[in-house]
Structure formats: C-alpha cells, structure tokens
C-alpha cells in the first residue's frame, strides 16, 4: 500500500509539472491500472523507505536515461523522492525499449550506505525490521538527505548495471 501511495504521488507530480507537460513519464495505462480493481504497480518499479532524523517535507522527481548495447536512451527512469515527517520514500520506475523488455535494467547509483539507510519495500521479499540502522540527516556528509535525493544523479551520462 505504501508503494502504491508513493506511485500515486509520483504520477500527480509527473502530471502536474509544467516542465513535463509534453514529456510525461507515466503512461495512461499505468495510471489506469493503479486504480481499482487492478491496483497494479507499474512494471519495472522498485521502492525503498528510510527514516529522516527531523521532521521534513519534500516531493521531487528526477529522470535518468541510459544506453544498452550502444543504443542511446534505451531506458528512461523516473525517480521520486518523498519526505513526510520522519518518513523518506524513494521510488524508481524504469521504462525500457521493447527490444530489451525482459532485461533487468537499473541505472548506476552514487555510492552510499543504501542497504543500511533504506529498506526495500517493493518488490516485497520477506520480513523487514523498522527502523533502519541509520537515519538521513539534514546536515553531515555520510547520511545527508541530499545524498538520497541525488542518489541516481551520476555524471552527465547515466549508466546502468
């Protein structure tokens, strides 16, 4: 439910941004399928939650692109980061050219302690223990919240692995 809520917010941000008016990320079928009775999460979506040490509010989108087999922009990803109070949520949805549709693609991410700052919540595998060992902080180098927001912003060209 938390992932579905975050995707809904991502779709609202995507659809309401004047900068994205002609180049929206989420397609009509993804929007329609999120509604009852299907309530399906878009294919190629991953989601994480973390803890923010103070109370904060943030909602932002970032696009990422990459090549596969020397085909530029073979995938496009939309990263949504939402902070509500002490909760930080990050969702990554990938759209891959049909010829690579069965390949698992994930953009290159900046180094970080993502496995100790964040819990995987989508896809769901096993039990999770809240809270994660470390919180994101408004200051400091190691666990600064800006590192989460810019987690997928790598150089001028985006790579994948």
Image (spheres, helix red, strand yellow):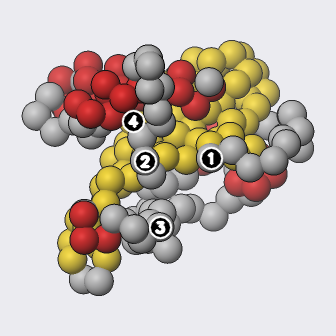
Whichever of labels 4 and 3 marks the residue nearer the N terminus, that label is 4
* Residue 116, percent from left and from top: 81, 51
Which residue is pictured at 34% across the width and 47% down the height? 63
Q: Secondary structure at mark 3?
A: loop
**Given this view, does label 4 or label 1 mark the residue nearer the observer?**
1
User: Quick check: 66 left or right of 114?
Assistant: left
Q: Secondary structure at mark 4?
A: strand
User: Quick check: 87 left or right of 72?
Assistant: right
Q: Nearer the viewer, residue 143 or 26?
A: 26
Q: Is residue 9 above or below residue 75?
A: above
Query: Looking at the rendered structure, which numbered label has been put on residue 104?
Result: 3
Query: Looking at the rendered structure, which numbered label has been put on residue 43?
Result: 2
Q: How far apart are the two marked residues, 2 and 4, measured between alpha carbons?
A: 18 Å
Q: Secondary structure at mark 1?
A: loop
Which residue is pictured at 42% across the width and 40% down the height? 42
User: Quick check: 22 left or right of 30?
Assistant: left
């Amino acid at each position: 439910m938390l992932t579905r809520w975050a995707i809904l917010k991502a779709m609202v941000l995507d659809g309401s941004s004047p900068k994205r008016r002609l180049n929206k990320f989420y397609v009509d079928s993804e929007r329609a399928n999120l509604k009852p009775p299907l309530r399906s999460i878009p294919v190629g979506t991953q989601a994480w939650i973390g803890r923010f040490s103070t109370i904060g509010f943030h909602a932002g989108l970032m696009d990422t692109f990459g090549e596969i087999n020397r085909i530029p922009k073979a995938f496009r990803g939309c990263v949504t980061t939402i902070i509500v109070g002490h909760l930080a949520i990050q969702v990554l949805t990938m759209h891959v050219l049909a010829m690579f549709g069965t390949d698992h693609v994930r953009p290159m991410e900046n180094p970080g302690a993502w496995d100790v700052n964040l819990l995987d919540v989508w896809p769901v595998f096993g039990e999770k223990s809240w809270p994660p060992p470390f919180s994101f902080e408004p200051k400091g180098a190691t666990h600064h919240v800006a590192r989460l927001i810019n987690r997928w912003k790598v150089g001028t060209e985006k790579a994948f692995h």
